[in-house]
Image (cartoon, rainbow, N blue to C red):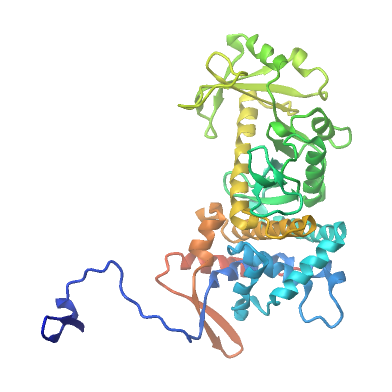
Amino acid sequence: MGLVEGPDRCCRRSTSQVKRTALYPRVRVEGGGRGAVSQAGGVLLVETVRKSGLDQAISAALAPWRKPRAVHDPGKILLDVALAVALGGDCLADAGMLRAEPAVFGPVASDPTVSRLVDALAASGPKALAAIRAARAKVRQRVWHLARNAAPDTGGQVIVDIDGVLVVAHSDKQDAAATWKKTYGHHPLMAFVDHGSPGSGEPVAAVLRPGNAGSNTAADHITTAQLALAQLPTRYRRGRRTLIRTDSGGGTHAFVGWLAQRGRWLSYSVGMTITDTIHTAVLAVPTSAWTAAIEPDGEIRDGAWVAEIAGDALTGWAKGMRLIVRKERPHPGAQLRITDADGLRLTCFATNTADAPIAELELRHRQRARAEDRIRAARATGLTNLPLHQVAQNQIWLEIVQLALDLLAWMPMLALTNHPARRWEPRRLRLRLFSAAAQLVTTGRSRYLRFARHWPWTDVITTAIHRLETLPNPG
């Protein structure tokens, strides 16, 4: 019944007679409810942790940091923070979101306990980082085995993209400095395994650097590549089946020479700065030597051509290196650079792949742009800022961010293989899957989460859970 007030009296009329003016229904709110679980869709990540064996691996790796008679396992504490970050948190205290739902996430340590563990790991320096990374590498190999045809190495090759990330600091933190974009903060270098067009990607390295660190520092690229290779299954840590892709920041003599070093023999596709020598060589390429660039579907890319150049431009570089240049009509409004020619934008990259047409190689290198998607996902998953003060602490935070991104990549790869949701980025996964609420029902000795039938993605959640449940438990 609706209530209608007049100037001198008050009368009740049926709801159907009341003229509705509000855009949304009025709902009364009160506390004290029981049986409802918020962020219930996070059970997808919990089950991914269990089936991948990540909980056991991290627990064993961090056993040296467990104090006698400690209540909470250090591995569980670190995973809880990673789960909170995967669900949208951006600081250590956001683990409290999990603490409120013990039926799904189990007992969660207090904020001071979490902070003490991060401080202890940071104080251990390389020892703690090596332990966490070794556990991740071990689990990654198992996850790829479980994923079978959905794994990133299904085609017989693994592609690792290396790129820099600018992280703005809003306070004076250790090693924060002015960046080349005239901001203030840090400049980490990260590496991601590309899942290709069917999926997303997963992080395999993150090196924290000051904000004024160079974009083309060869030593940092070598360190990042070493960490990335150590995360891959043993058979991909050397040899042509592993491709390292970078932008022009990786186009240095030292880094290319390291990639092609005898005994390592990695494949590479690295961007190159257009020098005067390269620019002169491009101008000398005859019209007949240019080949039309192609799109992923094999169609010709409108307004783009590629050619291979040789001669003096290759002097001093690693043996077997090919130099491929692309000329392209610039986008409307784009300003040409001094290295461009004839009104066309010039870009160049180097590769040591010898048995493929240059148009295919150029397409492969252009797909390095997917690394920008991975960086966007990282920013949405705890990398918007570095929440701690010391460098050692923030390096632990980077490992936590990588754990969260691993889970956000592994869960779709294992549970959403044949669904478009495998390509969803973290924000969409959170909005549609993880944020779904459910009713907690206890029957006998079992507990069930009942998701609402009217939620549009309940079928996606339940199907993914069932798929995870069919996977074998870790040995």
Height in image: 457 above or below 333? Answer: below
Camera-nearest residue between 219 and 405: 219
- Toward which corner of the image does residue 442 lie, by quadrant? bottom right
Q: How far across and down, in percent of the image, does residue 79 sit?
A: 71, 68
Residue visible at 62% across and 80% down?
A: 102
Residue 63 visible in rendering: yes
Q: Residue furthest left?
A: 8
Residue 470 visible in rendering: no
Q: How far across and down, in percent of the image, does residue 360 sit?
A: 62, 29
- Toward which corner of the image does residue 284 lie, by quadrant? top right
Residue visible at 49% across and 76% down?
A: 438
Q: How far across and down, in percent of the image, does residue 264 sit?
A: 85, 37
Q: How many marks?
A: 0
Left or right? Give the position of 255 relative to 333. right
Q: How far across and down, in percent of the image, does residue 287 sit?
A: 58, 10
Height in image: 28 above or below 397? Answer: below
Residue visible at 67% across and 64% down?
A: 82
